[in-house]
C-alpha cells in the first residue's frame, strides 16, 4: 500500500472548519483514500473514503486532488468532540478491500473552545 | 455503521496466566478480522490477519505461539495472550471487514499484566 504523510498535530477553533491534509504521492490507480479517527482510549472510527471524486457524508467531506497525490479531510463545523488522532490510509478498496489497514502516525487534531 | 463488539474492555491478570479477548461482528459477516496492539501515544501496529476457517497470518516479529488467534465463525475471532508478562500490557484492538466493506473497529481491550 502507498505511504501517506500527515502533519503530526493541528489546532482548530470550535465552530470553524478543520482541514486536515494528507500526501499520498505514490498512490496507485486502484487504491482508495480512507480516513479514520481515534478518540482517546477507543477503537478507530471510520469517517469517509474516496477514489477520485470528492465525497461528502454526515461526518465530513473528502477533497482529492485531480492527480490524486494528496487529499484533504474537512470537518465543516468542528466541535470539542472532534478532538482525536486522524489517520489517512491508502489501500485497495472494493471487493478486494478485505485487506489490512496500515496506520501511520496520523494528525493529532485539537479543537479549542 | 456496522458494529464490532470487543470484550472485555479492560482486564488485569497475573504474570504467567493467559487472557482471551473476543471480537464479534454484530450485524455483518466478517470474512476477515485483524488484530492490532497500541502502546501509549503510539499508532496502531498490526499483529495478525485472520480469515474465517483458516490459520491467521502474523506480521513479522509477532510470536504466533504467544498470541493465539482463532476465527472459527464469520462473526467471532478471539485473541489469546498466553503466559502473559508485564511487557504484554497494551491496548489491543480488533477490526472486522466483509466483502466490499470498510473495516470497522472494536472498542479495544486494555490489558494490564501485574
Image (spheres, helix red, strand yellow):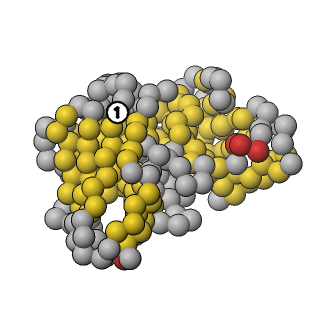
Is residue A109 visible in the rendered structure shown here? yes
Residue closest to the eye, B70 or A89: B70
Q: Which residue is mark 1?
A: B25
Q: Is residue B92 above or below residue B51?
A: below
Residue at (47% x, 66% y) in the render: B39
- The mark tally for this picture is 1
Q: Position of residue A7 (x, y in %)?
A: 66, 55
Subunit of label 1: B
Is residue B34 visible in the rendered structure shown here? no
Q: Position of residue A81 (x, y in %)?
A: 71, 43
Quarter-of-image position of residue A17: top right
- Is B112 left or right of A45, judged from the image as shown? left
Q: Position of residue B47 (x, y in %)?
A: 31, 57
Q: Is residue A65 above or below residue A8?
A: above
Quarter-of-image position of residue B98: top left
Residue at (24% x, 70% y) in the render: B17
Residue at (28% x, 61% y) in the render: B19
Residue at (53% x, 31% y) in the render: A49
Q: Quadrant of the C terminus of chain B?
A: bottom left
**Considering the numbered disc 1 on the image, is that residue within a helix, a strand or a loop?**
strand
Q: Position of residue A108 (x, y in %)?
A: 66, 55
Residues packed near mark 1 inside 10 Å, few (<14), some (14 to 19) or many (20 plus): many
- Is B48 left or right of A31, judged from the image as shown? left
- Is A54 left or right of A27, judged from the image as shown? right
Amino acid at each position: 500500500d502507498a505511504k501517506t504523510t500527515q502533519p503530526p498535530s493541528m489546532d482548530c477553533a470550535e465552530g470553524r472548519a478543520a482541514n486536515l491534509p494528507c500526501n499520498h504521492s505514490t498512490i496507485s490507480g486502484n487504491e482508495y483514500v480512507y480516513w479514520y479517527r481515534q478518540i482517546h482510549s477507543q477503537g478507530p472510527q471510520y469517517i469517509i473514503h474516496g477514489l477520485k471524486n470528492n465525497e461528502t457524508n454526515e461526518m465530513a467531506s473528502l477533497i482529492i486532488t485531480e492527480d490524486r497525490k494528496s487529499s484533504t479531510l474537512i470537518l465543516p463545523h468542528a466541535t470539542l468532540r472532534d478532538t482525536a488522532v486522524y489517520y489517512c490510509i491508502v489501500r485497495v478498496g472494493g471487493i478486494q478491500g478485505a485487506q489490512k489497514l496500515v496506520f501511520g502516525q496520523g494528525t493529532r487534531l485539537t479543537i479549542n473552545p | 455503521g456496522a458494529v464490532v463488539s470487543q470484550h472485555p474492555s479492560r482486564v488485569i491478570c497475573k504474570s504467567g496466566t493467559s487472557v482471551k479477548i473476543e471480537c464479534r461482528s454484530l450485524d455483518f459477516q466478517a470474512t476477515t478480522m485483524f488484530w492490532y496492539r497500541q502502546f501509549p501515544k503510539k499508532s496502531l501496529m498490526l499483529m495478525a490477519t485472520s480469515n474465517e476457517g483458516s490459520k491467521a497470518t502474523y506480521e513479522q516479529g509477532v510470536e504466533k505461539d504467544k498470541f493465539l488467534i482463532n476465527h472459527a465463525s464469520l462473526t467471532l475471532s478471539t485473541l489469546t495472550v498466553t503466559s502473559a508478562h508485564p511487557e504484554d500490557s497494551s491496548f489491543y484492538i480488533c477490526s472486522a471487514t466483509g466483502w466490499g466493506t470498510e473495516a470497522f473497529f472494536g472498542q479495544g481491550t486494555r490489558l494490564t499484566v501485574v
